[in-house]
Amino acid sequence: MSYDRAITVFSPDGHLLQVEYSMEAVRRGSTVVGVQGKDCVVLAVEKRAIAKLQDPRTIRKIASIDDRTVLAFAGLTADARVLINKVRVEAQSYRLTMEDAPSVDYLARYLARIQQRYTQQGGVRPFGIATLVAGVNDDDKGVKPYLYQTDPAGTHSRWKAQVIGGRNSKSLREFLEKQYQDLKEDDLTEEKCVRLAIQALSEVVDSGAKTMQVCVVRQGGLKEMLSESDIQAHVDLIQASMDEDKKTSSDE
Amino acid sequence: MMTDFVVSSPPCVTIGNDILDIGSRKARRQRGDPMEMLPSASAMIGAPGQFDLPAVANPAMYCRSHFASVCGTGDENQSVKFAKGTTTLAFKFQGGVIVSVDSRSTMGAYISSGTVKKVIEINPFLLGTMAGGAADCSFWERNLGMECRLYQLRNGRRISVAAASKLLANVMSSYRGYGLSMGTMIAGWDEKGPQLYYVDDDGTRLKGKMFSVGSGSTYAYGILDTHYREDMTIEEAIDLGKRAIYHAAHRDAASGGINNLYHMTKDGFVKVHSIDVNDMHYEFADERANAMAT
């Protein structure tokens, strides 16, 4: 009997094959990079080429789920739409019952719970998406930025910087780890975070503002989608510093 | 066990696939036994429809016609009347929240107890008062305590007073018309400071600085409204809470016994005193005599 037929069946070596196949669907999705700074979080997504007659404004990969929280996903767009709707309803329900905004980790936990439920129920398949949930909680204890990742298995974990989607997510993660080694937490201003996110994304997509969408979440929950010109400015600066490095290394 | 099972229908009716199912709930459900069609009460305590309801055709109507004198439907000669025979009060001031209650429980003209605990310690930072049906108050406030603890375990921090009172009010709202009787105040200290909410059995939820609930509340309000100031010292506030209960107990037949007074601070609640109102009578009488003498 094949062990990948039904979701509720374990394979003999302990794998839930449907869950692993759904992670493969995530890998086919477009790349998303998330970077957590000292008082902000940056999400940068790859904008895949679309058909000429398609309206680009209707393709949004970064969705707002509450005043202070945004979500970017990698994988099946339709599944993402359903999941985003569920978590938006939950955020409002939390606001109604608790008379307070839900925290980023509450929303990430809720998303993970839903994703897990669909791996342990008959007749359904897992959601084919992984998400990066980003937000800034600010309370009397100070400004706290959060970046959470969820995956089709229903796990959620907090990250300082993470990549989901795309074939090269592993090598990109190594790139981010290397960059992070030299940085201290206090150094990570918004400027540096945006630069790092765009730099990481540029490793896998053609450099240029047309292939990226960048969103910054700041203290007080203010979100901003960077304009093309802003992104282009960062791209140019990255290019310039890379050329500098090439020049100095070739001079030696 | 076979000895417990009474055969009420001949074995030609399919019991189940397994001989071990004989006498079991699953078998009874399959036979269409009306008692087993209801979900088990332990499945979801606190959710409407999940309780064992009165075994009548229309439980809501039954409750409304027999118990619901306090549910806004007016007095219809119900068999069981809950009068909120008590005095409980709470007020916010600069030093926190004072919660002061009496301890008398009456069944008509009979004083059934003079030592009822009308303040329920939900958790070290949340207090609930009890007025109305004692069973309803104590059950639902203990249930609230469970929900608050679950929130704390799931979210790693204490629940806010606004959210706790909202949870209770939502439950009351979903049981509207079922004859519950509860008039409570939820007092606590959370990130927003001292908080006080009034929650009712018909789902009313009010945020405020001062509330008094019960048959003696009018007398208590008289004293509170006259002497309340936001900037009282803690001693003055305690004295006010004590005095208001004394005056209510003095004039209201359904209030009396012992005054239990609590003070909610930012480090949790403190039980300030438990004084018999009769002793207070003599204390205040001396005070009045001294004041008149000067």
Image: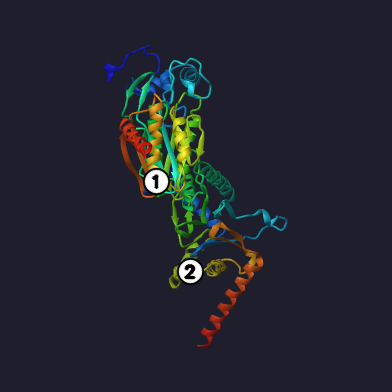
**Which of A81 and A18 lies nearest the eye of the viewer?**
A81
Which chain is disc 1 placed on?
B
Secondary structure at numbered mark 1: helix
Q: Residue furthest right?
A: A53
- Indicate whether A225 appears above or below B106: below
Q: Which residue is mark 1?
A: B152
User: Which residue: 48% across, 45% down?
Assistant: A114
User: Which residue: 67% across, 53% down?
Assistant: A58
Quarter the C terminus of chain B occupies: top left
**Which of B186 and A127 lies nearest the eye of the viewer?**
B186
Indicate left or right for B233 with A223 as reference. Answer: left
Q: Which residue is mark 2?
A: A175
Give percent across and percent down for residue B184: 44, 34
Secondary structure at numbered mark 2: helix
Q: How is the image coloured?
A: rainbow
Question: What is the count of numbered marks?
Answer: 2
Which chain is disc 2 placed on?
A
Give percent across and percent down for residue B122: 37, 39
Quarter the N terminus of chain B occupies: top left
**What is the C-alpha distance between the residues marked 1 and 2?**
38 Å
Note whether residue B197 is visible: no
Looking at the image, is mark 1 or mark 2 nearer the viewer? 1
- Indicate whether B267 appears above or below B164: below
**Which of A227 and A13 lies nearest the eye of the viewer?**
A227
Give percent across and percent down for residue A228: 66, 65
What's the amino acid at mark 2?
Answer: Phe
- Both marks 1 and 2 on one chain: no
